[in-house]
Amino acid sequence: MIYQNASDWRAAPRKKVLLFGMSGLGKTHVSNLLRAAGDWFHYSIDYRIGTRYMGEYISDNFKREAMKVPLLRELLLTDSVHISSNITFNNLAPLSTYLGKPGDPAKGGVPFAEYLRRQDQHRGAEISALLDTPRFIDRARELYGYDNFVCDSGGSICEVVNPDDPADPVLTALSDNLLLVWIEGTEANTADLIRRFDRAPKPIYYQPEFLNTIWARYLDENNLTEDKVDPDAFLRWGYSQVLAHRQPAYAAMARNWGVAVPAAEVARIQSAAEFDALIAKALEARG
């Protein structure tokens, strides 16, 4: 780790962290708070994925749908309209919409083969965006004068790395440049995330083997063919399994590559100074 203890962290002229954990536990909240403090650069992995690496896929998908409408088709073919996504740090809907949900097209689903293709695109994009982090650390300092840097990672980071491999290329590149910080939830947090997801299921990136396993099991248990799957029903059914699947991977990332901070304490942070104190406390606990 680039900060071996709390003293190293407190004395560091440049503080650089990567926040990871399940979506909904405070990564973006803290990143926004630090950015608002004025001396932190906020690098969002999901924003980078949706703009640099999957932006063309997303806009082409919009255009594909627009071409089905005669009026819009004519306007597109004559370059009379421009269609693009408007992704922001706090609105990643265009990326989620493109990633989609597998199942019945009449219910907004996409064929499973196409879903797998988009999942694979996301995997490559996420790895590339993570590996871009060191360059953005330098860019933030050289171009804009920011010494402090927070990387707001996606919830699926644990699906594209092997935390038990000491030579994992992504984690090595990240840990050489930032302190990896797990925002660790409790069972109560998990239950709350499941309730929130149940109200509004959102597209998710899955580790490929895990996805194929739960998809096959869902079809078998419900005696369904792929085109008869209710996309939201499948996502709701699988979400708690995704959380359980990711938890040990997050824990291994914190154990082998970084530190952990409780989600409840993260939720109480109101300033950059309080964030500094929480990280120092986590480093002290690690020993």
Image (cartoon, helix red, strand yellow):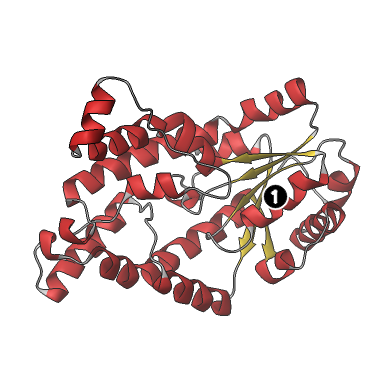
Residue 122: x %, y % from top left: 38, 41
Residue 266: x %, y % from top left: 72, 64
Residue drawn at x 31%, y 72% is 237
Residue drawn at x 71%, y 67% is 267
Total count of labels: 1
Residue 287: x %, y % from top left: 78, 58
Task: Give the residue at mark 1.
Answer: 32
Point out the image quarter for the N terminus. top right
Q: Say if residue 62 shows up in the picture.
A: yes
Residue 22: x %, y % from top left: 53, 60
Residue drawn at x 31%, y 51% is 100
Identity of the amino acid at label 1?
Answer: Asn
92 to 220, vertically: above or below: above
**Left or right, residue 253 beside residue 276:** left
**Left or right, residue 267 beside residue 90:** right
**Left or right, residue 233 beside residue 221:** right
